Every structure is written in structure tokens, then in C-alpha cells.
Amino acid sequence: MYGRLPIVKMLAATVAMAAVISAVMVSINWDGQEASTAAPKIDDLLNVMIVISSFVFSLVIVMLFYALWKFKAKPGDESDGEPIHGNTRLEVAWTLIPTVIVLFGGGYSWKVLHDIEEPAKNPLTVDVFSQQYAWSFGYPGKDNKFVEGEFHVPVNRQVQFKLHAQDVIHSFWVPEWRIKKDNVPGITTTATVTPDKIGTYQLICTELCGFGHASMRAKVVVESPAKFREWVTGLKETIPQPFLDSIKQDTETNPVPLDAGGA
Amino acid sequence: MVAAIKRPGWTRGALGALVFAAFGFGLVIALRAISGLPLYQTEQTGYPHVVVPLILAPLGFLAGFGCFDYWLRWAVGMPTIPEDHSQHGAKSWKDYFRFNTDHKVIGIQYICTTFFFFFIGGLMAMLIRAELAQPGTQIVDAATFNSLFSTHAVLMIFVFVIPVFAGIANYVLPLMIGAPDMAFPRLNALSFWMLPLAGLLFIGSFLAPGGAFDAGWTGYAPLSTGAPLGQSFFNLGVQFAGASSIATALNFLVTIITMRAPGMTFWRMPLLVWANLSTSLLVVAATPFIAGAQFMVLFDRILHTNFFQFAAGGDVISYQHIFWFYSHPAVYIMMLPGFGIISEVISTHARKPIFGYRLMALALIGIVVLSYSVWAHHMFVAGMFSWLRVPMMLTTLLIAVPTGIKIFSWLGTLYFGKIHTYSTAMLFALAFIVTFTIGGISGVMLGMVPIDIHVSDTYFIVAHIHFVLFGGSVFTIFSGIYHWFPKMTGRMYDEKLGRVHFWGTLIGTWGTFIPMHWIGMDGMPRRVADYATQFGNWNLLISCCAFFLGACQLVFLYNMVVSWRFGPKAEANPWRANSIEWQVSSPPPIFNFDEIPRVVGGPYEFGVPGARHAIMAGEGAEVPAAEPSVVGSTT
């Protein structure tokens, strides 16, 4: 019965439409500049998803508009359509094929997630303190250096950001790094980033934290290790005692990477 | 005057509200005086002398209005008022403003009330877009902005999308299954009257010192536990909306399970009935969680219970787990009834049986089961235990499968049919398929942890939720309203105006929400009153499209109001549909059926020679030979 449909032509139209949409969509740089080792991996995943999604979207459009063109009732035609109740093979196909596609997407995402959170040797640890509506940063060590509103990190070295919140939830996001994690009061959360491009970026609070939320920003500087050492050494302040106390009280969540067998 | 006070109604309701509020106020002041505390506690989260009357006044109104009269008389052993059907049906417009137990009246009460809140919430959206048209602060300050988007979301979710589906189903569902009314008509009326109270609490929070609640519709602790008084209005409003929702869902479950006409087996139920069965299963089990979450926040605020106070050993993240354990299923509570509407509309206007009816019903049940296991995908960056992310990602992606089944089955229904597109209902149904596909695709992307890490809490989220809630749910609501408008009002609406509304809404929706995907991925966070100048042009475009979209809804309003009053009289079955509600007059008789119909076949037997769905009263002679009850699967 379905031989009456031009299946091959419809599939060809779908593939052609998907190819055009994918080509346009993939050529656009949706996420902006890439400035960490995680960014290209996440953008690749996004592009793969765009290609798959273009195919799904094109399939729906072709199926819909072909039906509207071919099976639209003539004016005055009050008859009914053909009493087709279903087709088991077709229904099994559109259950199983999407299952395979989403499980592939899930596996691929899992792999990317594992890669971007893989701990490196000798990471730099930076404490990120957040309160309504300001960021401040600590460099734990014997000097406990501290700075407000701006922080520097060396290029090409993994940084483990230990995120703290003093009042309500805030969220740590540098769009160019593609990494985000909430600063949660009462616990310490961790964001892992390896910046790989020298430059100046912006840290944006992405969890609603009150009337000053939109302006809760900080300057991010990625620079050469030598410059970074010089900058840290030049810092005058040390981490205030109340911050150190609150870190001690906080419990640390999820320090364990995914493959380490649970928390 | 005395008679007005004795009789249930608005006077007694207002008096009840006043008396209960005064009692609550007096109780708080008296207890504080006895305890030697200052009489008024006006630290920003406190105000017990406001919160307690706010709990009691709505109950006083409901009692005074007559919602409990029958039960109270029965409970205390007084003679109950014999049922004279004076609370049934509507003879004039005034009857819609009374305690009425007729499911058709309640359905219309629901729809009109919820659309009232839709337009209020829409006005707030217009204000939000006006402020965001340019970077910087022009129209409202940041605190008011936070109140506006919080109230916009809460009105749209709790007193528009969720209850308007309950309203449509209230009207249509008992007719569809051949029942004279819902199983519990008095509970049905009580469910409705709790709803405007919830809406009033949400809007009334603008009068509270410190302004309306401003912690987002999600109300994350500890921002919400420390917020000004308006947050308590939200905590309480959710209780009334939630109780209304739960009671209605129980009513639907009992009605669907016990009151189907003879012969209507589960496999002969229209898909709208299946959809409301699955929705109700979600509501009864999930809604208590948000009620609980908001009570815990309220207790933290006024009783210092410290559920979410980290300094006192509370756990901040547990709020999000409890909240999303409701609020993710809530997404499907806002979508499944719409799926049901689309199935009815597409099958009728394509003159074709639903393609794969049984799999369509099973897909609904699959979504119900899976939707309880995906909530933490809202929390991939929240700092919860990291191992929870991958299983939640996989279940989230898998829920796309039953949803995809529905999309493909609707498309399959169109093939070899006779598609009529003269009805605005069908136009919205077809556009829904495309728009919802986009919302589904962005949903799958969001389900993938690495992509979600980047776009979480950005405008990408705003784009996704509006594509599924506006392009999804609201399109299905419009489709359903247009489809059943002749049945509900006995009048036809104006198809020309319907088309203007449709095309305007479609273009406005795409113009408003498509660019939001991009600015989100490019770095614009959500819930901000101000943003970087680089996003200025896009936001101006979005705002212009949003104003256009808003203006188009006025066409809808005009069409509905004028057609209801002056439209041409509707026939019983203008769409030539099969299901039972179309076999009675428009509007249906006060008790629906003179004689309960007998169901003899599936609901979508278009084109099957001699097939009938139901035999109505007086048609006894025409009963055809027994037909196979098996529909769906093979041809």
C-alpha cells in the first residue's frame, strides 16, 4: 500500500533539505569564541546534534507538507480518507530508530563529559567566593592571596575552581570556556577548566540572586604562566578569616570524577 | 440583607473571608501578646499577622460562598438540602458567577478565568519585553523586573496552562465518555473556586511591602526563604492552585475509570480521554511535592524551621530536588492534554483514523512513567552529586522516543486522508507539530549534559521553554478552544479572524523565540533586567515580535467575545466528528443525554464502511452487528 508514496523522492528531499540546513547551521559559530580545551569538544557535540536534528526536522517538514499537498481535500469533498489504522512495521521503526539515535547521543555526551572533567596532574586551585552582588577570588597556599572583582589564571594549565557562596546561590559561567557550575551556600562545588587562549573574558553570574543579578560580573584574564606568577605575587590582600572559616564548614560535593566508581 | 447573609453567594463569601481573616489576625496578635512578644513582627520574611489571615481568608470565602454547605450539613447531621438541580446548568450569564455543579458550566468558568490570567500574564510579558528592548534600565527597576518575570511565569503556569486544560477536559470529557457529569460535581466546583483565589494571591503580592515575589517561578532557596513578604503570597497561592489541581485530577481519574458509557472499553476511549487519564496520574502523585516544597519554604520564613538554611545545617540543594520532582512532571501535565486535543483535531479534519491508536495511548503512559525519572536534568550544573547526571541524561533522552512516536503518528494520520484546513483548530494543530518538533529538538540538546553545562540558565532555556509551552501547549489550547467553541457556546466563530490570529501567532512566536536560542548560546543569561550591548539589536527584534504576538491575541479575544454573542448558530456536529460530544446538540442539553449512549466501536472509524462509535438514544433499531473491538495496530 505504501508503494503508492514516492518514498525515495521524499527521502531525497529530506536529505537535501537536511544537508542545506546543516551546512548553514554548522557554518555559524553559535557559541562564540572558544577559549578552553572543553569548548571545541562541546561545540563538536553541538554540531553533530545540529546535523541529526536537521535531518529529523526536515523529515517532519517533508512528511507534513507532502501530505498537505497530496491529501488536501478538494472543495466540497465530504468523503472520508482511507481507513488505515496503522502499520506495525512502521510503528516499530519509528520507535526503535529514534531510540538508537538518542542512545548514540547519550553515549557521545557521556564521552564528552568524561573528557572535559578528566583531572590533570598538578592543577591550579582557585577559590571563588560569591555574595550579592560581587565576586572575589582566593589562591590557596601559604600566602592565601585574595583579590576582588578580577582574577587571573595561567594558560594551558588545568584550573580547579572551588566554588563558594556566602548568601544565596550564584553561578559561575565564562561563556568562552563553556563551563558553568553553581556556587551553593553550605557546600563547595567544583568546576574544572583548562583555558587555552590568552585573553580577557567575563565571568557572568547565571543564577538569579536578587536585584543586582544582571550586573554581577567579574573580569577574567588568561595569561602566560610567567605573567600570572608575577600578578599573583603582587597581590596585597589575603583571604579574609570569615571566608576561610566558611570553607572549613562547607562539605564538598562531587569531587569524584564520573569514572571513579560513585561518590 | 439577612437573607443575603444566610444564602450562599458573594455576600456571605465576602463576609466569610472577613470573619476568617479577622479571626486569624486576632489569633496571631493574642498569642504574641500572651507570649510577651512585640505584637507585629515585620522583619522582611515574617509578618505572621498577614500570613495567617491570608491562609484563612480564602477558606472563609469558600465556606461563605457555599463550597462546603452540603458536606458540612451532612457531617453535622443536619438535614441535607434535597438536590433540586438549582446549582446545575446556566440560564443566564449570572449563573457563571455562582457555585455551580454542572461540569459544562465549570468548564466555561475554568476557561474564562484562566484566559483572564493569560491576558494579565501576557501584559506582564509585554512590560518585560519593553524593558529588554534596549540595554540599560528604562521602564522598570531591576527589583520590579524580577517581580514581573516571576509573576508572569507563575500566572501562566499555575493559573493558565495547567487549569485551562482542566477546563477544556471538564467540558468535553464527560460528554466524550457518555457520562452525565463528573464523578464528584461538588468537589469539581470547589476545585474551580480555589483557582481564582490562587490567581488573586499571586497578583495581590504586588501590594505587599517589598513588592511581588521576585525569586523566579522556581523560587529557589535560600533566595526565596530570605525574600520579602510577597514570597509568602506565592507559597500560599501554590497551595490553592495545587489543591485545585489534585482534586480535579482525582475527579477525572474516578470519572474516567468508573463512568464510561457501556461498551466504551479502554481501547475505545478517544485519545483526549487517554491524555487526561495520564495527566491525572501525574498530578495526583507529583503535585504534593511542590505543595510540600512551598510549605517548607513558608515554614523556613515564618517558623524558622531551617529546612534550607545552610547556616543551621539545612540543605540548599534538596529544595531543588523536591521542586523539580514535581516541576518536571508538570511539564508533561502541561503537554499531555494538548497531545489529546491534537489527536482529536487531526483525526477529525483529516477524515482518517488515528495512525497507531494503541501505540499512541501507550506512548502517553510511557511518558508518565519516564517523566518521574528525569527531574535532575534541571540540575546538571546545580552542584548535586555528579554520578546522578548520566542516568538522568539517558532517561531524559529516552523520553524523546514516545514523544517522537506521537509526532510521527499524527503525520501518519494525515496520509491517505482528506485533509481539511478551513478550521483554525486544524491550522493550530498542524503548526503545533512543527513548532513542537523544534522545542523537542532543543529539549534533546538540553538533555545532553555537556551542552546543558554551557546553555543552562541562558536565553537558550527561555527559548526552549517558550517553544514547548507557547508553541506547544498554548497552540494546542487555541486548537482546542477553536475546535470545541461551537459545542460550548452553540455559536460559530469567525474563521477569517481565526486565520488572522493563527498566522499572526505563528509568525510572532517564531520571531520572538527563535532568536533567543542564539543570544543564549552566545552568552546572554536569563532573568536579567540589563544585558551587554552586543545583544541590543537582537533584543529589539525580539521585543518587536513579542508586541506583535501580544497584539494578535487581542484579535482572538475579540473573535471569541463577539462570536459568542453574535456568531451564527452552530450545528450539533459542524466538523462531522465521530466522538460522542458531537452527537448531542450544541450546546448540549443540561444533563447531556436523555439516555446514556452505547459505545459499539472505536472513536476514529473514519472511512470504515458502516462503522459507528456510539449509538445514541432513540437509535436502538439501527444497532449494527457486533464489530471487532480491536482498533489500531495492523490494517
Image: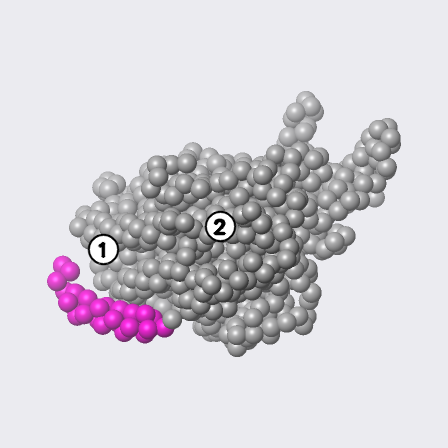
Q: Position of residue B96 (x, y in %)?
A: 63, 51
Dividing the picture into quadrants, the one containing residue B483 is bottom left
Decide: few, some or many residues near mark 1? Use Cα within 10 Å; few <14, some 14-19, many ≥20. many
In the image, taking residue B315 as reference, residue B20 lies left or right, namely right
Q: Position of residue B204 (x, y in %)?
A: 71, 52
- The residue tagged 2 is A125
Image height of B115 relative to A165, above or below:
below
- The residue tagged 1 is A83
- Report the chain holding disc 1: A
Amino acid type indicated by mark 1:
Pro
> Which residue is rendered at x = 43% and y = 33% of the image?
B258
SS for callout 1: loop
**Position of the N terminus of chain B by quadrant:** top right
Q: Which residues are magenta?
A: A1-28
The dominant secondary structure in magenta is helix
Q: Position of residue A234 (x, y in %)?
A: 59, 61
Who is closer to the viewer here, B331 or A78? B331
